[in-house]
Amino acid sequence: MTAARKRVDPARLAAFEVLKGVRVDDGYANLLLPAALARHGLTGRDAAFATELASGTIRRQGTYDAVLAACIDRPLRKVEAKVLDALRLGAHQVLGMRVPTHAAIDTTVTLVRAKVNQGAAGFCNAVLRKVAAQDLDAWLAQVAPGDLAVAHSHPAWVVEELRTALRDASGELPELLAADNLPPRVTLVARPGRATRDELPGTPTSYSPHGVVLEGGDPSAVPAVAEGRAGVQDEGSQLVALAAADAPVEGRDEAWVDLCAGPGGKASLLAALAAQRGARLVAVERHHHRAGLVRRAVGADPGVLVVQSDGTRAPFADDSVDRILLDAPCTGLGALRRRPEARWRRTPEDLAELVELQQALLEEAVRVLRPGGALLYATCSPLLAETAEVVARASGREGVVVDDLAPVLPAVSGADGPLPGTLQLWPHRHGTDAMFLALLRKQ
């Protein structure tokens, strides 16, 4: 078979399409991948290869760009975008996967020849041969010695924010950055009263009594997941819902609210817990599409009402709600294992806008919380601007206090948050997303 007739490898083509969807359509790799795998009929090892190729390339983009820049005689911004996508895929195979060098280069060149042109294919061949001249450690020593941002493929501003949030007295920052680049484990949750952890395959989670880590296979093939009695949910998110449900309240405990419920994972677990206690959950979500996802997640549960509404103008009277979960929109920089593209999209300007929204949401949550009730504020970000600073402003108001969360989640250790009584989970310590949790009360 001649070079011109070589068939493009389907797994690599699927990964190439995912990178394009992330770049052009602002898509998320974890949402684009299932469609790409199905489109090319990929299962088993081929699907796993395509998944690691796409996700791993996005995670390590900053590192590979530094290497590629040393191998190309013009700025990367002047390289055609789809050619750069292919070069990154090739670099990941050469430097980050156990793919023989000749196979990594040959398949990338074939892909570029089919999707761009012969000239671009020749260019990629020359560049990737330079990339393959030495291993990743040698490249890092050459292009960015001692630079954590390049070595661990995080934007420099994110590295500094994480350093501050970690209060890095013991030198944990490299461990945290490395954990952000590990493929996430698939974790399932059994919704209480509808499924038990014993009927789910996998290893029990360390802290959540309802979770298991799936050893392999398709989660949707698990009967309880297919039937909606269980779901896929990171253990950190399970702990957020459990803390919101288990925080003690004074008096009645009937009216529960999830103030930012989309896409519905925490709401579905809260709904199951509420049903066991005779409580009713109102799940509030501003955006129509995400409200639909919440409805799908909670199913036909008669104890749940999904309301499409702006959480900063919550449709509740003052002092009327017994228990509130505010899982606020945030930068998502605590979930970089699952959303690797977030690190390249977020900017300091985004942070400022999100903090303003978080403050407005928390102020509204305090308004509707009744005295004696419990309000759990959570973010999937450890950045202090989104965590300690937002909570400190709220607790500075008259009658609002931060309560101690440690007794609510006694199994969790090594999670002291930036404010007394708050908790901060970490990927490298707890194997979860970097969830921040604070329990507020109105006296």
Image (spheres, rainbow, N blue to C red):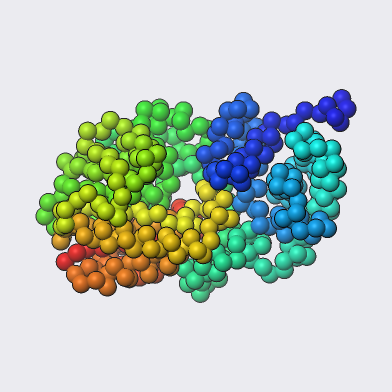
* Residue, far right: 2
Instruction: Evaluate whether residue 197 shows in this view.
Output: no
Between 210 and 38, the one lying in front of the other is 38
How many circles with numbers are drawn on the protein?
0
* Residue, far bottom: 169
Please identify the quadrant where the C terminus is shown. Answer: bottom left
Between 138 and 377, the one lying in front of the other is 377
- Where's residue 370, x and y in %? 16, 58
Q: Quadrant of residue 434?
A: bottom left
> Horizontal placement of 41 versus 366: left or right?
right
Against 193, is 94 above or below? below
Q: Quadrant of residue 376?
A: bottom left
Against 297, is 357 above or below? below
Q: Which residue is painted at 66% across and 53% down in the image?
A: 61
Q: Quadrant of residue 2?
A: top right
Q: Which residue is painted at 25% across and 65% down in the image?
A: 403
Instruction: Evaluate whether residue 369 shows in this view.
Output: yes
Against 191, is 424 above or below? below
Q: Which residue is painted at 39% across and 57% down in the image?
A: 379
> Horizontal placement of 239 versus 56: left or right?
left
- Where's residue 60, x and y in %? 65, 53
- Where's residue 309, x and y in %? 29, 46
Please identify the quadrant where the N terminus is shown. Answer: top right
Q: Which residue is painted at 55% across and 38% down in the image?
A: 32
